[in-house]
């Protein structure tokens, strides 16, 4: 995440961790450094950091960017635009009113502070009240020997809101 400049998390397992426990720490995105605050927000509410609580990861700290070069807000104030970033333009509320950076990542943080990112918020499929991570489905489909490429997207559904649709390239 470039908005956190030099470092966002560090994936160093705790001393004494071995075997499967050590591997679980290594596949996470790691811990946040002490000078970087984080929170998990689900449906507008800050939730406790446990493996079960998932939501958007938000961060703030001294080395988290405060704004974007020629952001829509700057242009509204009269700044000339020589640089455009479509992702930023499409997400004008990248920062909360109280100064947190909305990362756009959906994840969970363990009680000992290790972050696991599950998906990008815009890629999560919301079906019948459930959050379905496109990355998990893509990995399952890719496990089939006949599949070369796969993308899972949310497809509109009258009953469920969205349902997963796997688009594949077969061998």
Image (cartoon, rainbow, N blue to C red):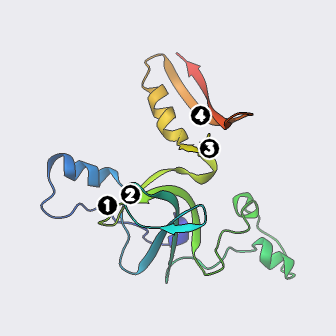
Q: Is residue 84 rendered to the left or right of residue 67? A: right
Q: In this view, does 61 lie to the left or right of 33?
A: right
| Mark 3, residue position | 126
Could you tell me residue 163's position as x and y percent?
64, 33
| Label 2 sits on residue | 29
Residue 138 percent across, percent down from the top left: 51, 33
Question: If you read the primary sequence from the N terminus, does the residue marked by circle 2 or circle 1 appear first?
Answer: 1
Q: Are marks 3 and 2 in contact (CB under 8 Å)?
A: no
Q: Earlier in the sequence, mark 3 or mark 1?
A: 1
Q: Name the residue under label 1.
A: 11
Reply above or below: 71 against 87. Answer: below
Question: Residue 4, position in %: x, y?
Answer: 50, 71
Q: Which residue is drawn at 67% across and 36% down?
A: 160
Q: Are marks 2 and 1 in contact (CB under 8 Å)?
A: yes
**SS category of the residue bearing label 4:** strand
Question: Residue 85 falls in which quadrant of the image?
Answer: bottom right
Say above or below: 6 vs 86. Answer: below
Dot 1, how many residues are within 10 Å of its Cα: few (below 14), some (14-19), or many (20+)? some
Q: Which residue corresponds to mark 4?
A: 152
Q: How far apart are marks 3 and 4 (CA)?
A: 13 Å
Q: How far apart are marks 1 and 4 (CA)?
A: 28 Å
Name the residue: 76% across, 67% down: 83
Whichever of callouts 3 and 2 sits on the residue coming sooner in the sequence is 2
Secondary structure, mark 1, is: loop
Whether residue 121 sits left or right of residue 145 in the image: it is: right
Front residue (pair 165, 64)? 165
| Mark nearer the N terminus (3 vs 4) | 3
Query: Is label 3 in contact with label 1 (beta carbons under 8 Å)?
Result: no
| SS under mark 3 | strand
């Amino acid at each position: 995440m470039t908005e956190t400049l030099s470092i966002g998390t560090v994936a160093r397992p705790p001393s004494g961790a071995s075997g499967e426990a050590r591997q679980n720490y290594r596949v996470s995105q790691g811990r946040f450094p002490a000078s970087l605050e984080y929170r998990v927000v689900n449906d507008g509410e800050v939730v406790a950091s446990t493996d079960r609580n998932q939501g958007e990861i938000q961060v703030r700290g001294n080395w988290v960017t405060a704004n974007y070069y020629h952001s829509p807000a700057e242009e509204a104030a009269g700044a000339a635009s020589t640089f455009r970033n479509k992702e930023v333009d499409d997400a004008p509320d990248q920062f909360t009113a109280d100064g947190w950076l909305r990362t756009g990542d959906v994840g969970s943080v363990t009680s000992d502070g290790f972050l696991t990112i599950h998906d990008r918020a815009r890629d999560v499929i919301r079906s019948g009240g459930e959050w379905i991570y496109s990355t998990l489905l893509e990995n399952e489909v890719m496990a089939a020997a006949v599949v070369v490429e796969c993308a899972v997207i949310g497809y509109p559904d009258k009953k469920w809101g969205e349902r997963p649709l796997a688009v594949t390239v077969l061998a």
